[in-house]
Amino acid sequence: MDINLFKFCSSLKALGYLMILMVAAIIVVSYYAVVVVTWGPKLLVGGLDSVLSFAIIVVFHILLILLTWCYFMVVFRDPGSVPENWRPVSEEYNLEEGPMTSSDCVVPETLNSTWSSSDGQERRPAVGYCIQCQNGKPPRCHHCSVCQRCVLKMDHHCVWVVNCVGAYNYKFFLLFLLYTFLETTLDTLALLPSFINFFGEAKNHSASPGNLSIIFLAFVINLAFALSLLCFIVMHVSLLSSNTTSIEVYEKRRAVRWKYDLGRKTNFEQVFGKKKALWLFPLYSEDDFSSIPALHGLDFPTRSDVEA
């Protein structure tokens, strides 16, 4: 009996909905432990404890709003789909010769397909053809076996958001990582005193067993997530600084000079836009969309364009 691995991969998408419930559960547990049990009651004590409690609760809610906003933007924002019957625009187009035909600009995607450049070196074509989607593939586009479609500037499929991370939502994903790391770090530090006193209070039965369990669980979960997210952030900062996706890492290692690396400042703007006021929010300005082609996921400037 033949087994269709692609259908098996697409069925894994259902597991992502369990991840969404898990994210919601972690938020609820952390909120109860930090706000309701630990720092909320200290608002009525007065003095320095009340000031510190107020500051922690305010920062907690600001980060929670931002990470939730970014999370929903990553979940519900299309990462970027290839337009139907997409064909690349020829760089050699002029009015006398007319546009190139589809046979000139779209090449069936095969692992061994290469072309010879003017310097005599063999290179892979900039665009290809997806057999699964029966459509052209823009540069940096990849087919996702889980979503069963091609995704523009695909970075990876994230089970935590039940969606691919691509050209249209990569900024939102990075902001989600950042705010979740800050939130879990704040929760860990806020719960640290209660966690240190956990064993003494449990031994003396001076606190509710249910509350002690919630504090212990919330501290361990937030600490684990903070440490793991720190690794992800460091990795994606490195990728962002060189204008590379997770899928392109191995391709970049084989290249002498990565063609999409335009310098750290320009690489950053290719993802976050040029409007500084919106860098920390999951939003783009109209000017960024009109002036930065990479945000559309179909055309990407290269080093040769900048150096020319």
Image: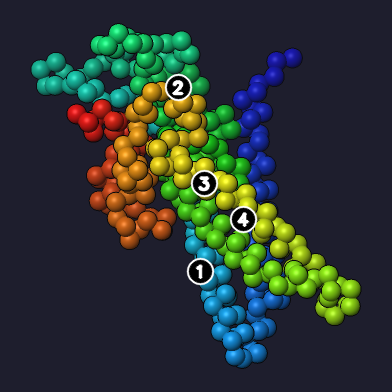
Tell me the mark number nearer the camera, choosing from 3 and 1: 3
| CB within 8 Å, label 2 to label 3 | no
The residue that label 4 is drawn on is 226
The residue that label 2 is drawn on is 254
On-image quarter of the N terminus: top right
CA distance separating discs 2 and 3 = 22 Å
Label 1 is placed on what type of residue?
Answer: Ile
CA distance separating discs 1 and 4 = 18 Å
**Relative depth, front residue between 174 and 235:** 235
| Residue drawn where x is 26% and y is 15% of the image | 101
Counting residues from the N terminus, which is met first, the one under dot 2 or under dot 3?
3
Whether residue 298 appears in this view of the structure is: no
The residue that label 1 is drawn on is 62
The crowding category of the residue bearing disc 2, from other C-alpha atoms within 10 Å (few below 14, some 14 to 19, many at least 20), is few
Label 3 is placed on what type of residue?
Answer: Val
Rendered image: mark on residue 234 = 3
Label 2 is placed on what type of residue?
Answer: Arg
The crowding category of the residue bearing disc 1, from other C-alpha atoms within 10 Å (few below 14, some 14 to 19, many at least 20), is few
| Residue drawn where x is 18% and y is 21% of the image | 93
Tell me the mark number nearer the camera, choosing from 1 and 4: 4
